[in-house]
């Protein structure tokens, strides 16, 4: 792949990169899969070779998922509990299950978004990739 092809595939702005990360795609090209397992980020993009092993997402995606799940679920729980007053056994079994499913569904997209943010901002080991992008665009 030459530099022109690569440049055409670069995301348009931060939201383009974050959207690619949210979908689990490489932030640089949008084609290759970012994850080689559920939460294991590939060392390199299989499509364009962009190095992704520099990311330092650590626990940040888990914190964000916790906040998001609570932010989305608590109003629903309060509305349902106040409107319908379901039996306790149903509340005790239903809400934790829904919270678990929501957290599992959000973890990979949120981690992809965090990695894409680090890539776009040139954090940690992504400085060289950011400088190469900016040099290629100039
Ligand atoms: Zn790529």
Image (tube, rainbow, N blue to C red):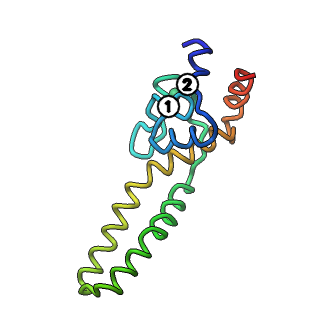
Q: Nearer the viewer, residue 23 or 115?
A: 23
Please name the residue that numbered disc 2 is placed on.
9
The answer to whether residue 83 is left or right of residue 127 is left
Vertical side of 5 occupied by 15: above or below = below
Q: Is mark 2 within 8 Å of ligand 1?
A: yes
What SS does tag 1 mark?
Answer: loop
**Residue 95, position as x, y percentages in the image:** 33, 74
Residue at (41% x, 60% y) in the render: 103
Query: Mark 1 to mark 2: distance in Å?
Result: 7 Å
Give the farthest residue toward the top. Answer: 2
Vertical side of 87 occupied by 52: above or below = above
The answer to whether residue 8 is left or right of residue 24 is right
Point out the image quarter for the N terminus: top right
Asked which quadrant contains residue 105, the reply is: bottom left
Vertical side of 101 occupied by 34: above or below = above
Vertical side of 121 occupied by 43: above or below = above
The answer to whether residue 80 is left or right of residue 34 is left
Please tell me how many numbered marks the rendered image carries.
Answer: 2
Which mark is drawn over residue 30? 1
**Residue 128, position as x, y percentages in the image:** 71, 29
Residue at (47% x, 36% y) in the render: 25
What SS does tag 2 mark?
Answer: helix
Which mark is drawn over residue 125? none
**Residue 80, position as x, y percentages in the image:** 33, 80
Residue at (49% x, 65% y) in the render: 66
Q: Is mark 1 within 8 Å of ligand 1?
A: yes
């Amino acid at each position: 792949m030459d530099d022109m092809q690569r440049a055409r595939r670069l995301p348009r702005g931060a939201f383009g990169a974050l959207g690619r990360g949210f979908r689990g795609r490489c932030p640089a090209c949008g084609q290759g899969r970012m994850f080689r397992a559920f939460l294991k980020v590939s060392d390199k993009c299989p499509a364009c070779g962009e190095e992704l092993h520099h990311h330092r997402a650590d626990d940040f995606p888990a914190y964000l998922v916790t906040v998001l799940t609570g932010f989305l679920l608590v109003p629903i729980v309060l509305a349902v509990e106040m409107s319908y007053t379901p039996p306790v056994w149903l509340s005790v079994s239903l809400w934790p299950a829904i919270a678990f499913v929501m957290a599992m569904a959000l973890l990979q997209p949120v981690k992809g978004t965090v990695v894409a943010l680090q890539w776009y901002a040139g954090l940690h080991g992504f400085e060289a990739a950011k400088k190469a992008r900016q040099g290629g665009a100039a």
